[in-house]
Image: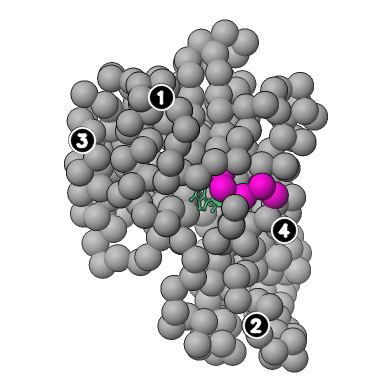
């Protein structure tokens, strides 16, 4: 089975950074779908299992949380981490979101956090098929632009001055050194649309969901080393990660040096760097 986004080799590092930077997004998904003790939860495109692990903790011993992903490397890390925390590693399965092998109406809650789907319509349709009538659905992509979810379990905001936030630095260095990368989309990462809120609402309506609502949430995580900020940006920016092997190593070195110079300057000035993880959520219920 092919992992079109080449997540296999980066699963461990991806897990470390995405848990550290994205935990409030996971918390939003749990609150929006009202995950509760004893429920059956499915996490689609679970990656290294960040959301599934949180759901396992909430549903407890009487519930079940299952994570599926196309990448065997991500599932291997998810299983390893489950074992370390005493959870069941059998609940992580290599599976294509295009063809979920579960029966219809199986789960109380179905979620997907930053999924990369080959066909969003087909995969969202599959997610809704396996959801019980009355069950709750939530999906999130990168972005924002809707009302902020009133997160009950919100983290204390890190004290990061505006000048220390380096959200646009990686992309602007990439544009300067590798303009050809920016011009082409990469893998299954969702394409940028002009009206993401309208597209998301349409997707959920077409899948037959009721009670559709859109929400946003953003969290800026602190970084105390420019190298670390570079490492996380290199991983999360799919179009760079996936084409890295095609690029001239000397040009990569120049690009990296440029980024590190810019980031270090900010770090010296502010004592901290900030990188924001923002999400646009779509929620609904199966009639
Ligand atoms: C950005 S990662 C998000 C992972 C995880 N949900 C998280 O928040 O950490 C996107 C995931 O989509 C998975 N993916 C891509 N195509 C898929 C497919 N057809 N079926 C299931 N998962 C897929 C990738 O393997 C990758 O783990």
Q: Secondary structure at mark 1?
A: loop
Packing grade of label 1 (10 A; few <14, some 14-19, many >=20) is few
User: Which residue is labeled 1 in the image?
Assistant: 103
Question: Left or right: 222 with respect to 121?
Answer: right
User: Which residue is labeled 2 in the image?
Assistant: 246
Q: Is mark 4 within 8 Å of ligand 1?
A: no
Frontmost of labels 2 and 1 is 1
Taking the spot 60% from the left edge, 76% from the top edge, the residue there is 243
Cα–Cα span, label 2 and label 1: 42 Å
| Residue 54 visible here | no
Q: Secondary structure at mark 3?
A: loop
Task: Residue 171: give x, y in percent of width and height.
Answer: 53, 76
Question: Left or right: 7 with respect to 27?
Answer: right
Residue 54 badge: none
Cα–Cα span, label 1 and label 4: 31 Å
Cα–Cα span, label 1 and label 3: 18 Å
Q: Is mark 2 within 8 Å of ligand 1?
A: no
- Please give the range of residues in magenta: 69-74
Cα–Cα span, label 2 and label 4: 16 Å
User: Which residue is labeled 3 in the image?
Assistant: 208
Taking the spot 55% from the left edge, 66% from the top edge, the residue there is 238
């Amino acid at each position: 089975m092919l992992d079109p986004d080449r997540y296999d080799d980066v699963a461990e590092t991806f897990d470390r950074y995405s848990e550290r930077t994205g935990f409030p997004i996971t918390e939003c998904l749990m609150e929006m779908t009202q995950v509760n003790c004893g429920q059956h939860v499915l996490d689609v495109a679970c990656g290294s299992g960040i959301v599934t692990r949180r759901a396992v903790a909430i549903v407890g011993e009487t519930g079940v949380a299952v994570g599926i992903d196309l990448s065997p490397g991500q599932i291997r890390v998810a299983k390893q981490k489950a074992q370390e925390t005493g959870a069941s590693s059998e609940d992580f399965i290599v599976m294509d979101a295009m063809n979920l092998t579960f029966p219809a109406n199986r789960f109380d809650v179905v979620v997907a956090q930053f999924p990369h789907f080959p066909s969003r319509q087909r995969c969202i349709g599959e997610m809704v098929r396996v959801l019980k009538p009355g069950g709750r659905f939530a999906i999130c992509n990168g972005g924002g632009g809707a009302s902020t979810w009133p997160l009950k379990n919100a983290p204390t905001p890190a004290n990061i001055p505006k000048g220390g936030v380096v959200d646009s630095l990686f992309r602007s260095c990439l544009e300067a050194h590798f303009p050809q990368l920016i011009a082409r989309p990469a893998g299954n990462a969702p394409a940028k649309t002009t009206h993401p809120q309208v597209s998301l609402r349409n997707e959920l309506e077409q899948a037959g969901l009721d009670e559709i609502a859109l929400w946003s949430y953003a969290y800026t995580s602190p970084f105390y080393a420019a190298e670390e900020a570079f490492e996380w940006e290199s991983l999360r920016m799919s179009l760079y990660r996936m084409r890295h092997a095609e690029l001239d190593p000397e040009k990569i070195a120049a690009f990296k040096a440029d980024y590190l110079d810019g980031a270090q300057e900010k770090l010296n000035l502010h004592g901290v760097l900030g990188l924001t993880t923002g999400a646009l959520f779509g929620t609904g219920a199966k009639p």
